């Protein structure tokens, strides 16, 4: 086994892990909660350490602290039984030296619902590692380069390679925790059909549903994912033995569920082998479906891009919402499921994958300003452990990355976010407004118990610009406000209150240790004379009005104290 990093004789610290919180989980790295400000690189970047290293200073300038990069089965086991980690070790060392953490993406048997990343000795052998077949018109079967998930030889070979990778990571990185999580496979599923049409798949589809899975889905139906209940609620109370059609009814969705059972069993074999070697968080990423039209969030897309409305237009058998409980039952060594959000509504998807208080991690998303604004509800309202735009290493010029600003702000207040996520999840929420004000646009409203906060775009005589940010209620009752372009009106929930106002707004500056220090104090027209908290826009538009009542956003962090008044007793 080739390696370029020396082994360490130090007693390794506790490896990265997930710690349960009241409403979710947090990622713990080197004993402390860690907020992932991530970026996923293109698939080939980690295959060349020199190229990868050349990007690290630019990623640092974007305020990224965690890099997601692919490790392919073909790269580490080019010859069966012979492993080579030299290039990967160079990447890990470069990241470590420049202060980055890594999330490795295991491109084993599956990548984007295809099998293009296994080594040559797997790809060339359709006898030992048979591929799936699409059902075509006229009962014609078309072979596609996707390994059958029923294939024990492929499953065991993949598991052996993944175990070797995880064993190696423990050897060279457990003392450092450079690598903090690993993704197992990539967007598993089958495109072009709702199930494999091979003889093996057809025989299994006509066989009974595995007894344990059927009993689990039947007896616990009321507690399962809402989309499962919506599509398969008739399973409640059924008992076997039943075929897949007898249990769930005929049609593509049942075939999708059947494939989910096969893929999840395959992934569990791989994940269990790796976790037995090095127990750090393992997750799967998800190529999304649109469970209904309201989930879609895109304008024009090219005609050759599938809409994701039915199995085969999205990877059939993947861990989408209605299949999630099959994966959770069959693959207990996968800690959570991470949605790749490009074409769907960000908040709906986040809520979908937060089911049953699972942690939210978004490993792939839009890298533009539209996408960047949407990370605020993810970190705030949905308590995300991290978000990550995809393809950041082809975004040029890199200085123009919108994530530089957003990640910089999140970095500055990370301690306050992590504290609220773990200890006071009802005291934090995020929001955004897009470039153009919409006719039916509504404010964001959040109850903090004794106060209700209403967030709107900042008042302006001119054009109202985009806005994004977060409110964090502190234990002492004050609010930390982060972001730009919005204003917050507070209202006491005390029925005796006759007035609610802003007592004091302090501009805060972030310190190296993550604490905040007071800078300027805002009042007067900068708080609309105590009526609300104002987080100024980046470039105020006065529309020719001669009084510049808004100051431009500077630190974009404030501390706000709120008060309320009750009617004097003699007036009651």
Image: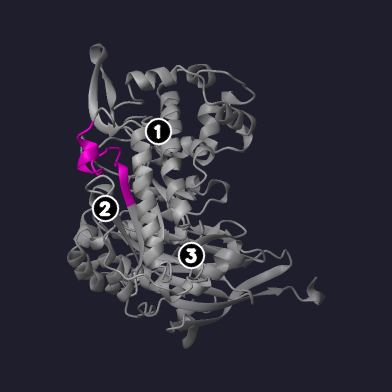
Asked if 43 appears above or below 545 in the picture, the reply is above
Q: Which residue corresponds to the image point at 50% horizontal and 58% vertical from the top-left?
A: 444
Left or right of 117: which side holds 557? right
For mark 2, give the secondary structure: helix
> Depth check: 13 or 32 in front?
13
Q: Is residue 107 magenta?
A: yes
Q: Which residue corresponds to the image point at 63% horizontal and 34% vertical from the top-left?
A: 220
**Mark 3 or mark 2: whose residue is earlier in sequence:** 3
Q: Residues within 10 Å of mark 2 (few under 14, many from 20)?
A: many
Left or right of 284: which side holds 51? left
| Residue highlighted by disc 1 | 317
Instruction: Give the residues in magenta.
Output: 106-125
> Residue 15 — which label?
3
**Mark 1 or mark 3: whose residue is earlier in sequence:** 3
For mark 3, give the secondary structure: loop
Asked if 89 appears above or below 157 in the picture, the reply is below
């Amino acid at each position: 086994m080739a390696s370029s990093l020396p082994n360490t004789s130090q007693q390794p610290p506790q490896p990265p892990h997930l710690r349960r919180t009241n409403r979710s989980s947090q990622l713990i790295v080197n004993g402390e909660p860690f907020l992932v400000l991530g970026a996923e690189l293109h698939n080939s970047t980690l295959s060349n350490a020199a190229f990868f290293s050349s990007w690290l200073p630019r990623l640092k300038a974007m305020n990224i602290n965690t890099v997601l990069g692919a490790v392919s089965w073909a790269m580490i086991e080019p010859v069966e039984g012979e492993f080579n980690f030299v290039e990967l070790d160079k990447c890990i060392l470069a990241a470590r030296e420049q202060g980055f953490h890594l999330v490795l993406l295991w491109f084993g048997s599956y990548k984007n619902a295809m099998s293009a990343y296994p080594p040559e000795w797997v790809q060339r052998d359709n006898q030992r590692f048979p591929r799936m077949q699409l059902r075509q018109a006229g009962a014609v079967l078309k072979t596609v380069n996707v390994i059958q998930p029923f294939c024990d030889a492929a499953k065991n070979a993949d598991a052996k390679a993944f175990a070797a990778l995880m064993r190696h990571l423990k050897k060279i990185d457990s003392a450092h925790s450079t690598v903090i999580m690993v993704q197992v496979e990539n967007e598993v599923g089958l495109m072009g059909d709702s199930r494999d049409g091979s003889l093996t798949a057809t025989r299994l589809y006509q066989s009974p549903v595995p007894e344990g899975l059927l009993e689990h889905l039947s007896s616990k139906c009321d507690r399962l994912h809402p989309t499962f209940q919506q599509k398969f609620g008739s399973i409640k109370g059924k008992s076997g033995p039943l075929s897949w059609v007898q249990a769930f009814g005929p049609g593509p969705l049942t075939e999708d569920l059947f494939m989910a059972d096969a893929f999840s069993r395959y992934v569990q074999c791989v994940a269990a082998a790796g976790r037995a070697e090095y127990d750090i968080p393992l997750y799967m990423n998800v190529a999304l479906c649109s469970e209904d039209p309201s989930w879609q969030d895109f304008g024009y897309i090219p005609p050759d891009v599938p809409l994701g409305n039915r199995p085969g237009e999205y990877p059939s058998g993947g861990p989408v919402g209605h299949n999630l409980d099959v994966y959770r039952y069959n693959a207990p060594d996968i800690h959570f499921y991470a949605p790749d959000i490009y074409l769907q509504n960000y908040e709906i998807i986040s809520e979908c994958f937060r089911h049953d208080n699972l942690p939210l991690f978004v490993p792939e998303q839009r890298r533009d300003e539209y996408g960047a604004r949407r990370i605020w509800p993810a970190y705030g309202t949905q308590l995300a452990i991290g978000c990550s735009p995809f393809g950041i290493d082809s975004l040029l010029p890199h200085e123009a990355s919108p994530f530089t600003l957003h990640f910089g702000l999140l970095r500055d207040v990370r301690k306050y976010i992590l504290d609220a996520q773990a200890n006071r999840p009802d005291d934090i929420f995020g929001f955004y407004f897009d470039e153009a004000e919409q006719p039916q646009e509504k404010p964001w409203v959040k109850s903090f118990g004794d106060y209700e906060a209403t967030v709107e775009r900042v008042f302006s005589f001119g054009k109202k610009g985009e806005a994004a940010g977060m409110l964090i209620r502190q234990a002492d009752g004050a609010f930390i406000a982060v972001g730009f372009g919005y204003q917050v009106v507070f209202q006491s929930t005390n029925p005796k209150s006759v007035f609610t106002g802003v007592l004091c707004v302090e501009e805060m500056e972030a310190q190296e240790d993550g604490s905040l220090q007071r800078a300027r104090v805002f009042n007067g027209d900068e708080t609309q004379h105590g009526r609300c908290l104002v987080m100024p826009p980046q470039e105020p538009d006065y529309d020719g009005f001669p009084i510049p009542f808004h100051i431009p956003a500077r630190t974009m962090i404030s501390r706000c104290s709120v008060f309320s008044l009750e009617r004097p007793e003699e007036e009651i």
